[in-house]
Amino acid sequence: MLDTGLAGRTALITGSAQGLGAALVRACHAEGAQVAALDIDDGANRSLAAEVDPDGERIRTLRVDLRDPDAIAAAYDEVRAWRPVDVLINNAARPLARTLWEITAEEWDEVFAVNLRAVFLLTRAVAADMRDRGYGRIVNVASVAGQTPRPTGAAYGTSKAGLIALTRVFAAELAAHGVTVNAVAPAMIDTPMVRSIGPGALADLTAQVPMGRIATPEEVARVAVFLASRQTFVTGATYDVNGGVLMR
């Protein structure tokens, strides 16, 4: 059994209130970590924390709008005043299905503000403290959309491709300082948002997966937890969790 070494560590997770984010909160909490859970949906975030950590001892929730650089800085100041961050999981994302011809400049900027700029700003702040302490684990949630072109993935796919590149840059910067930086790249995940596209569309998408189904949030979270563990010789990597949609 993998000894993750997360017990007693502190994990900061963005986009924590539902879907994969909620699975990440559950997984890190189950491994004994304290969790700083950041989401714009404060009500759902608090409900999750009350369910997972009813004593309120190991999960702290913060409402933050990742489109706002000042809000990101303030949230991180509040988290590190609570506990030093050992693990950062950048999970929050702004999905958008638009072709190149449909997307507006405002939509493009919003997707990049959440999916890439916020990751850059938060990671730079957290990683500086990790570097000074000589230990840290950073995991970015990318997507198969950032690895293969899709007609409606103009902004989302490009932002996720940028996230994969940013993962490698941070990994190179931090490799000598005890800090690893990696990414997971899921395909479709079984979440309420995905289910909302309707059974017909979901069946069509599932048929494109060689394994014949879409991933559960827990399957993706387990890979993220591995990358957040004490393992020390994996950095700058992107782990594909896509059921065979992309094989390389």
Image: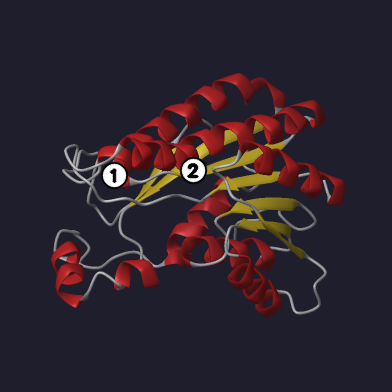
Would residue 182 appear left or right of 59 to someone viewing this image?
left
Q: Determine which of the numbered discs, if any, sits on residue 44 in the image.
A: none
- Residue named by callout 1: 145
Would residue 111 appear left or right of 25 to someone viewing this image?
left
Residue 244 in view (yes/no): yes
The quarter of the picture where the N terminus appears is bottom right
Q: Amino acid at mark 2?
A: Val
In this rendering, is residue 210 above or below 185? Answer: below
Give coordinates of residue 233: x percent, y percent: 58, 33
Question: What residue do we see at 20% from left, 46% from top?
Answer: 152
Give coordinates of residue 240: x percent, y percent: 36, 46
The image quarter in which residue 25 lies: bottom right
For the rendered model, the colour scheme is secondary structure
Q: Earlier in the sequence, mark 1 or mark 2?
A: 2
Compute the Cα span from label 1 to label 2.
16 Å
In front: 52, or 46? 46
- Residue named by callout 2: 114
Give coordinates of residue 245: x percent, y percent: 22, 51
Specify few, some or many for label 1: CA neighbours under 10 Å numbering under 14, 14-19, or 20 or more.
many
Asked which secondary structure carries label 2, the reply is: helix
Residue 146 in view (yes/no): no
Q: Are the residues flagged by discs 1 and 2 in contact, CB closer than 8 Å? A: no
The quarter of the picture where the C terminus appears is top left
Specify few, some or many for label 2: CA neighbours under 10 Å numbering under 14, 14-19, or 20 or more.
many
Give coordinates of residue 208: x percent, y percent: 15, 59
In front: 48, or 177? 48
Q: Which of labels 1 and 2 is toward the front?
A: 2
Q: Amino acid at mark 1?
A: Ala
